[in-house]
Image (cartoon, helix red, strand yellow):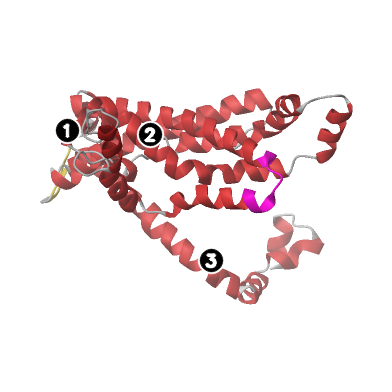
Amino acid sequence: METYFSEVHIPMGNRSAYAPGRAWNRLWKYRMFYLLMLPGFVYLVLFHYLPMLGLRFSFYDYDLRGVGDFIGFEHFRDALSSEGFTRAFKNTLILSSANIVIQMTLTISISLLLNELKNRLFKRAVQTVIYLPHFLSWVVVGALFTLFLSRQGGLVNAVISGLGGEPKYFLGNPTLWRGTYLFILSWREVGWGTVVFLAALSGVDPQLYEAAIMDGANRWKQMVHITLPQLVPVIVIVLIMNLAKIFNLFESVFVLYNPLVYKVSDVIQTYVYRSGITQFRFGYATAVGLFRSVIAFALVVSANKISSRLRGESVL
């Protein structure tokens, strides 16, 4: 054993840390921590890594009968030439991009407004109210807004009719669906998104504001020259995290869309669902999902490189 350690040039004082017995002793000493980590590790392996073995179906003629012949990139060529995929890809980019812009704007604005509140009780009450929608499942949210926006008996259309207007089918009209969807998505998620920015604001050095007040800066100038620059690193991180999820739209769309609005609402995830689950085109659906993951990865890497050039350091 001494010869082995001398060959790899491990310093004398650190040799005991690399001994197999020492590693087992540490494992046994901290066994409770490893046991606490075990469920999360098992979940990660079973539901995130093992399913990746199914990516090979993208290159095979796979259906309910099993794995067929190797067909290479035929599924990918079919997807790129498919009108349905092109439409879903475009809708995903439009909805995700609009959602990122709207949510970033609203979360930053609301965080700045909440940060200005001096009454702690009122501030916590407002935070609680805007956080609550995040904890509702999308099934519940979809059911609620389907009732509220219904043409027959819906609260919103009842108000419109009472004002002399004509009831509208918000979730069945291609012209109104995107705006309605983005409103519902923002209503559910914006409050929760303020958590990160409020945490960042709480870490701003109060001496900066004191110095600005002594220099005669009002609240607006303090926000422009102190608060927002302090938020820039957090904004970049949140933006990159959102880019990583840009193609992950599924539940929110699935509970709110219908065949009448497929033209403006069908996204890649719902397209994959219909192709694989309802049409049994498992190989094709896997290929589309793999293509989505590769594009999302490229977006995250690109955003990280842009952040590295602008800020001098990368996030990932």
Query: Is residue 29 visible to us here?
Result: yes
Of tags 1 and 3, the one toward the viewer is: 1
What residue did someone put label 3 on? Answer: 37
Q: Secondary structure at mark 1?
A: helix
Q: Give the residue displayed 30% in from the left and 38% down from the top.
A: 156
What residue did someone put label 2 on? Answer: 182
Where in the figure is residue 202, as x and y percent of width and height? 71, 44
Instruction: Decide whether residue 7 is among the magenta residues.
Output: no
Where in the figure is residue 153, as x and y percent of width and height? 22, 44
Q: Secondary structure at mark 3?
A: helix
Residue 6 falls in image quadrant: bottom right
The C terminus is located in which quarter? top right
Instruction: Give yes or no for contact between labels 2 and 1 (Cβ–Cβ under 8 Å).
Output: no
Q: Nearer the viewer, residue 15 or 236?
A: 236
Q: Amino acid at mark 2?
A: Leu
Q: Main secondary structure of the magenta part?
A: helix
What residue did someone put label 1 on? Answer: 260
Q: Give the residue displayed 49% in from the left and 33% down from the top.
A: 300
For marks 1 and 3, the one nearer the N-term is: 3
Instruction: Decide whether residue 121 is among the magenta residues.
Output: yes
**Side of 311 relative to 157 (left or right):** right
**Side of 249 relative to 78 (left or right):** right
Q: Give the residue displayed 84% in from the left and 28% down from the top.
A: 212
Residue 282 falls in image quadrant: top left
The N terminus is located in which quarter? bottom right
